[in-house]
Amino acid sequence: MSQKAPVSVVILTLNEEKNIESCLKSVYGWSDDIHIIDSFSKDATIEISRKYTQNIHQVPESHWARIRNWALKRLPLKYDWVLFLDADERLTEELKREIAEILTKSPKENGFYIKRRFIFLGRWLKYGGLYTRVLRLFKKDCVRYIELGDCEYAVVKKPIGYLKNDMLHEDKKGISSWIEKHLKIAEREARRILEKKRAKLNFSENFEIEGREKILIREKIWDRIPLLLRPFLLFIYCYFLKLGFLDGKEGLIYHLLWALWYRLLIYIKVREIQNEFQ
C-alpha cells in the first residue's frame, strides 16, 4: 500500500454507480479525508460511497466550477492540500507515492499539474491532444475556479509544479450517458456563445490560470470562426494535425463524437435558442 498522504480528496458525483467505486478504491487508505459532493444521484452512488467515507455532502446540480468553489469554502477539510477528482478518474500507485513524498516535505509550490491518461473503449488515447495536464492538486487557500460555458479552469497562486506520474480517466457509464451529458453541457456552451461571455482573466502574474492559452485562443480565434465550420475544423485539427488517427478506430470514434458531433450539437442548440426568441 502507498504511503499515506496529508491531502483531502474531493470527488464530484451525479449518478456515478458505474465509476465511483474504482475512484474511491484508488484513494481509500491513502487519504483519510475523502469527501463526496453529490448532486442528488438517483442510482447507488451514495450507497457505494458510504463503504469508503461518511463525508457525503449533497448540493443541487450546477456548473462544476461553482460546486468546486463551494467545496473549498464550505467543506470541513482536514488538510491544507486538496485533490479534486471526478468520479471517472483514479490514481495510479506511482502517482500516489509521488504525491505523498512531495507533500510530506512541505513543498514551496502552491499547486501541481498532473498528467491524465484518457481511456476510451478500453484504449489509452495518446494522441489528438488528449494526453494533457490538469491542475487538480493545490493548497485550498490558494485556488478558485472560473467557469466558461462547458469548461472550468483553476486559478492558483504561483509557484506551480509538475508531477511526473499519471492519473487515469475512464468513464464506464457507456455511450448513452456520455451523450446525455453532452446534450446538457452543449446548451451551456450555446448560451455562452449567444451571450458573448468571456473569461475574467484579470489576475496578476502571481497566479497560474489553468488553460490560459486555450482560453485566449478560444476568445481571439475560435469564437470568430463561423459556428457551422467549427466542428469540421476541429476534427481536422485533432484527428489529422494532432495525430489522433494513430489511436486506431477508438481514436476515430472519439473524435467523430467529441470534435464533430458535439460541436454540431452546439450549433443546433444555438439555432434552437435563437428561434425561441423570434
Image (spheres, rainbow, N blue to C red):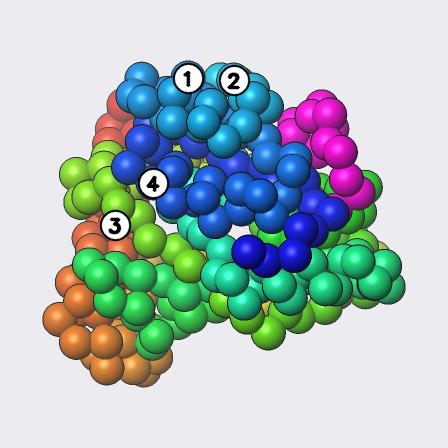
Residue 97, by quadrant, is bottom right
**SS state under label 4:** loop
Query: Which of the two marks, 3 or 4, is nearer to us in this view?
Result: 4
Q: Find the distance from the CA under tag 3 to the CA under tag 4.
A: 23 Å
**Image vertical order of residue 259 relative to residue 196, above or below:** below
- Residue placed under numbered mark 2 in the picture: 58
Q: Find the distance from the CA under tag 4 to the CA under tag 2.
A: 18 Å
**SS state under label 2:** strand
Q: Nearer the viewer, residue 6 or 16?
A: 6
**SS state under label 1:** loop
Q: Find the distance from the CA under tag 4 to the CA under tag 1.
A: 16 Å
Boundaries of the magenta span: 69-82
Mark 3 Cα within 10 Å, few/some/many (few <14, many 20+)?
some
**Magenta stretch contains residue 77:** yes
Query: Which of the two marks, 1 or 3, is nearer to us in this view?
Result: 1
**Magenta stretch contains residue 266:** no
User: Residue visible at 26% across and 46% down?
Assistant: 172
- Residue placed under numbered mark 1 in the picture: 40
- Residue placed under numbered mark 3 in the picture: 262
Q: Give residue 81's position: percent from left, percent from top.
A: 74, 46
- Residue placed under numbered mark 4 in the picture: 19
**First-in-chain label (2 vs 3):** 2
**Image vertical order of residue 189 relative to residue 130, above or below:** above
Query: Which quarter of the image is occupied by the N terminus?
Result: bottom right
Identity, as a three-letter code, of the amino acid under mark 3: Tyr
